[in-house]
Each structure stands twice: as structure tokens, then as C-alpha cells.
Amino acid sequence: MDTLTHALSGALLARATEPKDPRPGQLPRRARLWVGFWAAAFPDSDFITRFIDPLTYLTVHRGITHSVVMLPLWALGLSLLFMLLVRGKYSWRAFVGVVALGIGIHIAGDVITAFGTMILAPLSVWRAQLPTTFIIDPYFTAIIVAGLVASAVWKRTRKPAVIGLAVLAAYVGFQGILHQRAVAAGEAYAGQHQLEAGSVEAIPQPFSPFHWMIVIPQQDEYHMA
């Protein structure tokens, strides 16, 4: 997922989880939104490895900064940084929950793409992936923006943000159904052409949730559609 969409999703989640009656010492709404925004953008800070080597970037991207194992450490570190930025006006405890949610929704947003995410780094390089969504999905982003705009219009309730997240989850679920249909089409093709049994991959493509690349790997060739 692109970094801006990640950041906006963090802001939407921060608004959806805002306490109805904030206690003294808790973040006000504007600060909460900005903290969610920047926390959700943080995992993509691994882009600095591009300056080392493009291959290094491809190898480590969505690694340690995208790990659920490291999430508590990143949440604590960013919370302390935010506390310093506001010169101690709020305790790190006021930031840590929002930061953790922001990083968490970023990780989830990358897991649903075909590239996958090393959620167990540095313990494992295994990439979790549920390839339902293309890395840049205008519909996905539009749902998030609509939720934020609605939240700005109806300021007294967090329901627009909650509804926005629910619609977003439903959209990804719909994409998951389409993914299964694309895989089934590939399996039917493999059966009709007596291809060797193997994994059928369905990879989301840009511009439409109905657009998929189906790949059937064989020993010496690939069948693609």
C-alpha cells in the first residue's frame, strides 16, 4: 500500500477509537489524528535502504519496521519521541496506544498485498500475504478519505470513522471473494489442460478489483492470463 494511504488509515483508526469522554492528560482530537497519521506512515521509513542499494531495499522492505514482534518497541520509541516534541505536555502513555494502532493498521494494509510482509522479523523472513489488494487502490483510498471527511463534518460522533472502517473491511472482504474466484478460474484451466498439480496464483492488478493476473507455474514454463 502507498505510504499516504497508510497514513490516512492511521488517522481514521485514531478517530474511530477516540474516547467519548477524554480524561485529563489524554490527547485532544487534532493531536490524536496527527499521531495516528505519522505513526501509520512510520513503517515505510525503511525506504532509506534505497540509498544503500536497490537490491537491499527489496530484500529488507516490509521487514523489521513492519514486524508485529517489534511493534511494542517501535510504539514505545515513537511515543517517547512525540512526548519530546510536545515538550512533555503529554505523557508517553497518552501516545502509545494511538501509535500502536497506527503501526498495526499499516502492517495489516501491507499483508493484504501480493508482496507480503515479514511480520515475524527479525525472527523469520517469512512473508505473510493475503493478496486481495493492489498496492495502489484508488477505491481503498477513497473509502478512507470519505470516512475522514464525514468525521470532519459530523464532529460530535465517531460513528462516521467507524462506518468508514467497516466499509473498508467489507471492500477487502469483497476483494477476497474475487481472489478466490480468480484462483478457481486458474484451477479449472489447469484441469482442462491437464497441467501438473501446483499452486495457482491470483495477483491483483491496478484500477479495478475485477482485474487479476492468474499465474500457473509449471516445471519449465508459466501459464498466465
Image: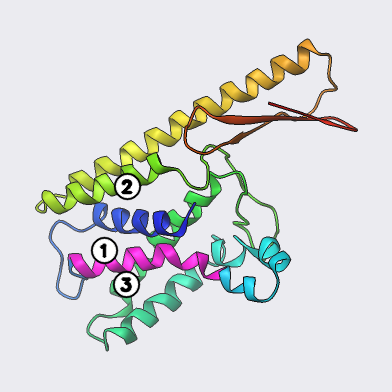
Give above or below for 210 relative to 157: above
Query: Where the C terminus falls, by quadrant?
Result: top right
State the residue position of label 3: 95
Counting residues from the start of the chain, the first of labels 2 and 3 encountered is 3
Closest to the camera, between mark 2 and mark 1, is 2
Report x, y in % for residue 181.
Answer: 57, 21
Name which residue lies at 52% across and 25% down.
178
Counting residues from the start of the chain, the first of labels 1 and 3 encountered is 1
Count of marks overlaid on the render: 3
- C-alpha distance separating marks 2 and 3: 22 Å
Label 1 close to label 3 by CB (< 8 Å)? no
Give above or below for 118 relative to 129: below
Magenta run includes residue 5: no
Out of 196 and 57, give the one closest to the viewer.
57
Label 2 close to label 3 by CB (< 8 Å)? no
Q: Residue furthest right?
A: 220
Out of 180 and 186, give the one closest to the viewer.
186
State the residue position of label 1: 33
Name which residue lies at 57% across and 69% down.
46
Looking at the image, can residue 71 be seen? Answer: no
The residue type indicated by label 3 comes to Phe
Judged from the image, the secondary structure of the residue bearing numbered disc 1 is helix
Judged from the image, the secondary structure of the residue bearing numbered disc 3 is helix
Q: Which residues are magenta?
A: 29-46
Give above or below for 27 relative to 67: below
State the residue position of label 2: 144
The residue type indicated by label 2 comes to Ile
The residue type indicated by label 1 comes to Leu
Q: Quadrant of residue 65?
A: bottom right
